[in-house]
Amino acid sequence: MLTYVQAIVLGVIQGVTELFPISSLGHSVILPQLLGWTGVVAAQSAQESYFLAFLVGLHVATALALLVYFRTTWARIVRGLILSVRIRRIETPDQRLGWLLIAATIPVGIAGLLLEHSLRVLFATPMAAAVFLFINGLILLFGERVRRRAQVRALVASHETNPSGDRRLVSLEYVEAGAIGAAQVFALLPGISRSGITMVAGLARGLDHEDSARFSFLLATPIILAAGLYKLPDLLGPNGDGVLPQILAGSIAAGLAAYASVRFLTRYFTTGTLLPFALYSLALGGFAIVRFASA
């Protein structure tokens, strides 16, 4: 059964790694195995278990932390969407950003409903997560490389740019936003980071790191919240019996860690790159592959 220590540790891991581009699901699978938490490892790959209820609490807490941090932005977006529907046109950047987020949410929403449970059960093994985490590092390295290509710079030159010379977020086309959202489908695999792969997709369309991260965090909010609310019966049903206090403790830890993480990352990506997270993913993924292969 899940202990309070395990719940809090996993909550902190969820809150940090959901937003850092290093895969929350990958870490929640790899670290329990490295720590010898065999009961947690077995629960992760089971069709029905307390771990499903635990994930619901962590996801809802993470989404609420994002909502609190971006509360003023979301208030402007919601007001803008309501007004744009009323006047039947898009006039402001907030209105356009709202519709871009909707366009980006649709692909992963559909894929999540169809594939999330089956992929989680199929690939929620330590070795699979280690391999995908290593691949995540390669994806992040690719993102840093692709943004310097001539095709991307030409794309930037053909659109409105910000003072740093990169493409403005609101200049994205709706098809491009949909493609960025569709990239999140790969994050259903444990080890592939949701925020990382959406940032790479944004960089490939000429956005800078700051706008790519901002769009990724805003996009994650409704998706994570919807996933948690959709699975709420797992929390309130038999899967949650006997572990609700531990879930509450883990959820509080996840919410606090997520808030601290998004606050740090929004500042970091004003000048920072994906390189440190790529190297971390390659190092931990490579170590875990060797460790599990020799076990």
Image: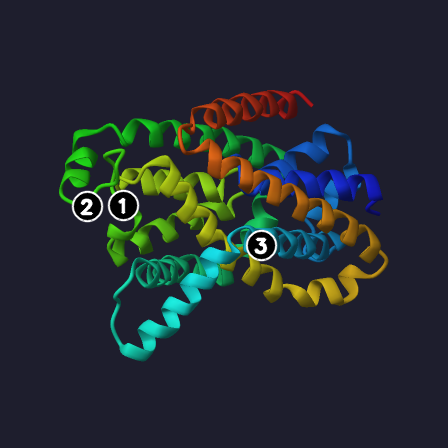
Tell me, yes or no, whether the two marked residues, 1 and 2, touch with CB atoms within 8 Å: yes
Residue at position x 68%, y 32% from top?
31
Dot label at residue 68: 3
**Residue displayed at 40% across by 48% down:** 215
Label 2 sits on a secondary structure element that is: loop
Amino acid tagged 1? Arg
Estimate the x, y position of residue 277 in percent, counting from the top left.
Answer: 49, 28
Q: Quadrant of residue 260?
A: top right
Specify the amino acid type for callout 2: Glu
Q: Mark 1 to mark 2: distance in Å?
A: 6 Å
Residue with the mark numbered 2 = 160
Tag 2 or tag 1, which sits nearer the N-term? 2
Q: Residues within 10 Å of mark 2 (few under 14, many from 20)?
A: some
At mark 3, the secondary structure is helix
In the depicted view, which residue is nearer to us: 57 or 217?
A: 217
Which is more N-terminal, label 2 or label 3? 3
Q: Confirm whether residue 184 shows in the render.
A: yes
Residue at which label 1 appears: 168
> In the rendered view, would you say 143 is above or below 255?
above
Q: Residue furthest bottom?
A: 86
Report the number of numbered marks: 3
Q: Quadrant of the C terminus?
A: top right
Query: Camera-side residue: 88 or 17?
Result: 88
Return the x and y of residue 173 as percentages of the image width and height. 24, 55
Q: Quadrant of residue 285?
A: top right
Judge from the rendering whether residue 249 lies leftward or rightward of residue 148; answer left or right: right
Front in this rendered view, residue 218 or 136: 218
Say whether residue 23 is visible.
no
Indicate the amino acid at tag 3. Val
Tell me which numbered mark, 1 or 3, is placed earlier along the sequence: 3
